[in-house]
Image: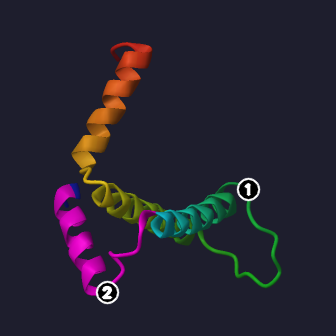
Amino acid sequence: MDIHNHARWLKDFTISRQWYPYPPFVRLAFMSEELGELAQAVRTHEIGRDHPHEQKLSEDEQLSHIREELADVLDNLLIMADKYGFTADDLMQTSEAKLTKRFGEH
């Protein structure tokens, strides 16, 4: 799978669901919600959760949950970037340029 194809598919999907028009502040709230869910999934995997009403998850289930939440965060990030006219390539190039400038070549 290619990130650019996914970003296009995701934009079309969110437009069809009428979610795309939400402004960046709302998207940021959605992303924060997904980050919280990711934090809970990572906590469960790394140190556990001692909640009597929650069923214990297997290692595979925990990792599947982490992957799902990472995907949700990525999707929100891709939509947010698109709202500002940035592509995944733009973000990756900016990241590499910033880190190289700050720390030198790797």
Q: Secondary structure at mark 2?
A: loop
Is residue 2 visible in the rendered image? The answer is no
Q: How far across and down, in percent of the image, does residue 103 sit?
A: 43, 16
Number of marks: 2
Q: Magenta region, mostly helix, strand or loop?
A: helix
Mark 1 or 2: the one toward you: 2
Q: How far across and down, in percent of the image, does residue 4 sit?
A: 18, 57
Q: Is residue 98 above or below residue 9?
A: above
Q: Which residue is mark 1?
A: 47
Left of 84 or right of it: where is 1? left
Q: Quadrant of residue 71?
A: bottom left
Count neighbours of disc 2 (C-alpha within 10 A) and say few if under 14, some if 14 to 19, many if 20 or more.
few
Q: Residue at x 51, y 70 (%)?
A: 30
Say which quadrant the N terminus sits in: bottom left
Q: Residue 12 lies in magenta, yes or no?
A: yes
Q: Residue at x 21, y 76 (%)?
A: 12
Mark 1 / mark 2, whichever is N-terminal: 2
Q: Residue at x 69, y 76 (%)?
A: 56
Residue interval drawn in magenta: 4-24
Q: How far across and down, in percent of the image, does residue 59 sit?
A: 58, 65
Q: Quadrant of residue 43?
A: bottom right
Residue type marked 2: Arg
Q: Which residue is mark 2?
A: 17
- What is the C-alpha distance between the residues marked 1 and 2? 37 Å
Residue 19 marker: none
Q: Quadrant of residue 99?
A: top left
Left of 38 or right of it: where is 75? left
Say which quadrant the C terminus sits in: top left
